[in-house]
Amino acid sequence: MSVNLKGKIDVVGRTDEGQIRDHNEDYISDNPTLGIAVLADGMGGLNAGEVASSMAVHLLMEALTAYRVGDSQLAAELAHSDSELPIEAQVVRKAVENANDAVFHTSQTQPQCKGMGTTIVASLFYNNKISIAHIGDSRVYLFRGGALEQVTKDHSFVQELIDKGLYTKEEARTSDKKNVVTRALGVAPFVEVECHEYETQVGDIYLMCSDGLHDMVPDRDIERAFVELEGNMKELANYLVDLANANGGKDNVSVILTRIEKPYPDEAGGGLFERIANWFE
């Protein structure tokens, strides 16, 4: 099942250590041709956070790339699954679960990595859809029709308070517990991975970001940046990171922007004309 989304989606990413931290524990990677993007925000003592984030991202990129080029054990592992999720969403979720196993094992066997973990957001684009798997408080937003919407829900202490009606979103933004996550990859032998599939439209822009952005920049200001700069993805990514730093830059800040440029048919059975056209793109 070889896939080629060249020209169908445009992806731009940027990561920055911010204004306070002396090193970057965020890690990002993407492959626009295969429709893959992954972002992680590491945590742990010494440099263990950056070990967790880079390890998780590399494992996910390797697994999802293998799946997209038709050389993967993930689909075989899921052959008898009774999940109601489509196979692509199951693959992304399974890849995250496998990464959790590996990061947790490393944290238990390498003393310098003890207690490390990471948030994760992984997305896979296919058949005019996107599957998103996430753990923690790194987010995905969708900009469509001039409006920004948060797609993922944080796995965090303050989000639980919001869900119970004990906090407003504004109160959560100023809470001293806003960075306490209730789930993280690699800190336990099992973690519940939240995964959903969504329909995409031409012109959609998906924003993946660490909390270094959404803690520093209110959603209304992120939306305003999209309205003003959506025509230049690189400029928009740079502006968002620079805005987080201008507002204090108290944490590492990372963004990945993915814009849907063209519709793309079923990749498994796309027509002959489509496949020939892809050869010349």
Image (cartoon, grey):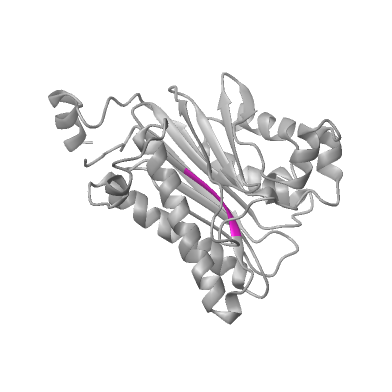
Query: Is there any visible trace of residue 25 in the rendered image?
Result: no
Query: Is there any visible trace of residue 188 in the rendered image?
Result: yes
Asked if the magenta segment contains residue 99, the reply would be no
Left or right of residue 181: residue 146: left
Residue lying farthest to the bottom in this orientation: 111
Q: Is residue 167 above or below residue 54?
A: above
State the residue in front, 228 or 122: 122
User: Which quadrant would residue 271 be assigned to in this image?
Assistant: top left
Image position, residue 102 (x, y; %):
46, 65
Image position, residue 278 (x, y; %):
21, 34
Asked if the magenta segment contains residue 120, the reply would be yes
Image position, residue 129 (x, y; %):
41, 28
Identify the residue at image location x=66%, y=58%. 252
Q: Name the quarter where the C terminus is drawn.
A: top left
- The rendered magenta stretch, by its main secondary structure, is classed as strand
Q: Is residue 47 above or below residue 70?
A: below
State the residue in front, 162 or 264: 162
Identify the residue at image location x=43%, y=60%. 58
Residue lying farthest to the top in this orientation: 145
Q: How many marks?
A: 0
Which residues lie in the magenta part? 118-122
State the residue in front, 75 or 173: 75
Identify the residue at image location x=55%, y=65%. 52
State the residue in front, 56 or 229: 56
Image position, residue 255 (x, y; %):
57, 47
Left or right of residue 108: residue 127: left
User: Which quadrant would residue 45 be assigned to in this image?
Assistant: bottom right
Q: Name the quarter where the N terminus is drawn.
A: top left
